[in-house]
Amino acid sequence: MLNIENLHAEIDGKEILKGLSLSVNAGEVHAIMGPNGAGKSTLGYVLGGRPGYEVTQGSVTFAGEDLLEMDADARAAAGLFLGFQYPVEIPGVSNVQFLRESLNSQRRARDEKPLSGAEFLKLARAQADGLGMDMDMLKRPVNVGFSGGEKKRNEMVQMGILDPKLAILDETDSGLDIDALRVVGDGINRIMRRPDKGVILITHYQRLLDYVQPDFVHVLADGRIVRSGGKELAHELEREGYGAVAA
Amino acid sequence: MATLPTNAQEAWRWTDLAALTSAAASPRGDAPAAESYWLGIPGPRIVFVDGVYALEHSTPGHVALSPLTLDTAHPLGAQASGAAGWSIDLSAAEIVDPVQIVHLATGAESHLPARLTLDEDAVAQVVETYVGTGWTNRLTQIDLERGARLMRSVRLLQSDGFVSIRDEAVVGEAASLITQFLGAGGMGSRIDAMLTLDGDSAFVDYGGALLTREQQRQECAVAVRHAALNGSSRQTWRAVAADRSQASLAARVEVARGAQKTDGEQSLRGLLLQRTATVNLKPELEIFADDVKCAHGATVGELDARALFYLRSRGVSEARAKALLTKAFVSDALDRIGDDTVREAFAADADTWLEASL
């Protein structure tokens, strides 16, 4: 599904990713762990197509297409979802409007019929219910005045509505208390744990992995994957620290 | 043409006087149709073609048409005084249907005075639309007695030329003057006002959105004067400037000695769609009382790059994402229009502008 080969990327002339390779197949959940500054968020942004991140070497294919050639919105329409570590507040645009615009933009890009207001609201209500978010929050401006946990929950509601093929979730567990962590973890499993979908969980801590069991764990250090293993690697990292494992 | 102000005068430094004079010198042409500008609300409908009442297209209802000599010292406003104009004169507690006025301009210059006098507790609503080309000059004097309410929405949609508006209002005890503007045409403009809160607990909400592109220049120059106790005023202006255009917002709050417990709020914000565009902001506060609350904010910026990427990462195209964010910016001002039909029509005009400009 996703194939990253020898990816080098820089921002403001500073190289952050230094030859990263990773393959994600349908049906797999990969966790990418690593110390601060290793390049975890940069990987998410480069895959999401954020302006300012320059790929200097390597390739990324997604569902057989050259991902790096696509604009951010085309990547989304192709089925890629980036869950933000810090979801952005947008005053003056309601969540409902934002989501409907997003979904219908993607549908139009795929030559599918846009959803009517009623069809969309039904879908939005079901996804919001599944994540314990009430409809009043959906009517409020995007993320404005939301707590950290509410913002992350909102990311998951968006993921549920957009129904991507591949989700890259950047520190989705940060800012969550233990109950919210369970709700978000359940949401990831329900929406993405399918044979035709893939997930990359970018996380600093192992705690989200108690709820979303990864098939593979990779350690990212200094812009490269330095070790890969099964879920037991996450426990080893937690026990011994990045210094010992990444060395 | 009478003597015009010059850009050397501080109050007129940003006015596109060249656009005004060239509009005034333009030839008259055919009048565009007024039909598509009527909103689906009941009430009198009046058409002026080049400032002249068009009997066959109008149903004036409670609106009177007669020459009006209005006392003003304003250099542009004074040129409209003495001409045949329109007026609404409501007696106490009278509530009337909204009045729609379409000003069709075909070229050259036109001057039209108006007078709105609302006695105690009377309520009126006016929606004005400016279309066509040429220099369109208007003077409106407003007198609101105790508890009277006037809701006014004005959209400037002239494709070309220049629209100058001068409002002079006296707002009495517990009376409300609410006026929102939308400048979404291709003309130059100046919205100029002197509004006086003259009675205890008077209220003024006066603002709008000016959208400029290409070489266009639009501006507002508004003074709100608190002359009595307990007055509140709101001035919410938004400017969006594209290409090499210029939008200028000058808004002043004056609090007279003795106008205690004044609550004045002023918010001026500009959005540059390209770095070649200009937004000028000039917030002014002049306070001679000591127990007042006057909040003001003035900022100019570009679209938030993080919000743009957030939208695009969800599948929204760049142009659409910019339009959504710009619309949200403009809605701060347009959402203050109370009437749903009017607000939606103005929002649709702003959308049309955005779609053509992004």
Image: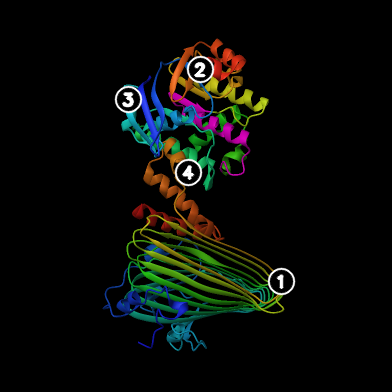
Three-letter amino acid code of the residue under disc 4: Ala
Query: Which residue position holds label 1?
Result: B230
Decide which of tag 4 and tag 1 comes sooner along the chain.
Answer: 1
Task: State which mark lies toward you, 3 or 2.
Answer: 2
Please provide the residue range marked out in magenta.
A142-170
Discs 4 and 2 lie in a common subunit? no
Discs 1 and 2 lie in a common subunit? no
**In the structure shown, which secondary structural element does the residue marked by tag 2 occupy?**
helix
Task: Give me the C-alpha separation between circle 3 and circle 1.
Answer: 67 Å
Q: Disc 2 is attached to a residue of which chain? A: A
Q: Disc 4 is attached to a residue of which chain? A: B
- Residue A240 coordinates in the image, percent (x, y): 60, 15
**In the structure shown, which secondary structural element does the residue marked by tag 4 occupy?**
helix
Query: Which residue position holds label 3?
Result: A59
Tag 1: Cα neighbours inside 10 Å, few (<14), some, or many (≥20)? Answer: many
Dividing the picture into quarters, in which one does residue B317 lie?
top left
Query: Which residue position holds label 4?
Result: B307
Task: State which mark lies toward you, 3 or 1.
Answer: 3
**In the structure shown, which secondary structural element does the residue marked by tag 1 occupy?**
loop
Discs 4 and 1 lie in a common subunit? yes
| Count of numbered marks | 4
Q: Residue at x 61, y 20 (%)?
A: A207
Task: State which mark lies toward you, 4 or 3.
Answer: 3
Query: Which residue position holds label 2?
Result: A246
Judge whether residue B165 is colored magenta: no
